[in-house]
Amino acid sequence: MNVAVIYGGRSREREVSLKSGKGIAKALRTKGCNVKEIDFTSKDFISELNGIDVVYLALHGRYGEDGRIQGVLDILDIPYVGSGVLASALAMDKAKAKIIFKNAGIRVAKDKLVYKKDKSEIDIEKLTAEFEFPLVVKPNQEGSTIGLSIVKTKGELNKAIDDAFSYDDQILIEEFIAGKEVTVAVLETETEIKALPIIEIIPNKNQYYDYESKYAPGGSEHIIPARIDDKTTDLLKEWAIKAHQALGCETLSRVDFIIPNDNSLPVILEVNTLPGMTETSLYPDAARAIGLSYEDIVYKLIKITQNKYKNKQ
């Protein structure tokens, strides 16, 4: 099997993508695949896809996880791991995804979408009346908590808004929900869709699960299965699959939630359509919990993709 692993790219998550891609390529070679590694920085990357049977997209963020490269591969009629154009674009757009989640009966945090063109009209007094502190300010279409701020006082709000707008023309202002952060990996084969064991995430570096906690060595601890009751476990798995399906995701996703400290219903944070796939990433951790090694899950995703493509023809 000739597999192209596309990684790197031009998003702010390039370094994470490089790590995922290198690990995936190595894993597929151990499974006997002929692997071509493509750093997605050149406009000539299409010519490198000649003779490729299937693509593993190890890209994160803009141009990789937002549906753009998926559209190119659809036009070229080359199968690829992960969701299609629409699901990828919707998942990347947090505001639109939240509307879909809410309509599906999944609890979301209260929010306000603000456009950069309206920045001069933002009424800080009105905002602080609408939302209690702390609150969350983040770009609408970024991943890995890039540009996200936890704002504790009114004096910090303007800077947080400016920071978020430096990454995107749309930002979300959300209520902050204190609680336990968990994530649910979803695996969709040709015949079934299932949620893998839930992972509880404990940041070691900082108070919140930010960029450093996600990617720095020892930045966080992953507890599998999460220390939650059976009722909450069942609900989270049900909602993870429902979110995956509501967006139209395919093959894999990872759905992040907060379980509030006040024992109210969980709150969905986002759906990752191309979750990180380094050997210490969350999705491979969940796969190991059901007996699949890192190499096994990477190869399985390739085979699922190939089989789905054959069945469509």
Image (spheres, rainbow, N blue to C red):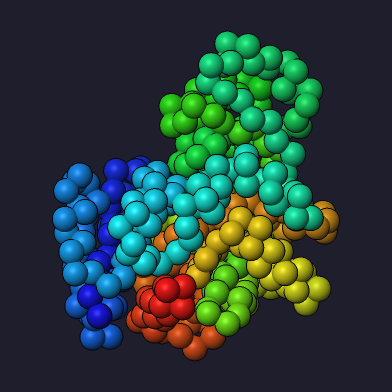
User: Can you say which quadrant of the picture contains the C terminus?
Assistant: bottom left
Kindly tell me whether residue 28 is visible in this rendering: yes
Residue 90 relative to residue 142: left or right: right
Expressed as whole percent of the image width and height from the top left, the position of residue 283 reads 48, 70
Query: Who's the residue at 22% across and 75% down the image?
Result: 2
Determine the image quadrant of residue 187. Answer: bottom right
In this picture, is 292 found above or below 23? below
Q: Which residue lies at the image location 62% right of the left edge and 47% below the top edge?
A: 97
Question: Which quarter of the rendering shows the N terminus?
Answer: bottom left
Front position in the image: 186 or 42: 42
Q: Is residue 246 above or below residue 13?
A: below
Q: 48 or 183, which lies in front?
A: 48
Measuring from the top left, give residue 145's x and y in whole percent.
50, 45
222 relative position to 216: left or right:
right
In the image, what residue occupies the spot 68% across and 17% down? Answer: 124
Nearer-the-camera pick, 45 or 137 = 45
Rendered location of residue 260, percent (x, y): 75, 54
Height in image: 178 above or below 49?
above
Farthest residue to the top: give it: 120
Name which residue lies at 53% across and 78% down: 189
- 10 or 282, which lies in front? 10
Q: Is residue 258 left or right of residue 284?
A: right
Residue 222: image location, x then y, percent: 53, 69
Residue furthest front in the image: 313
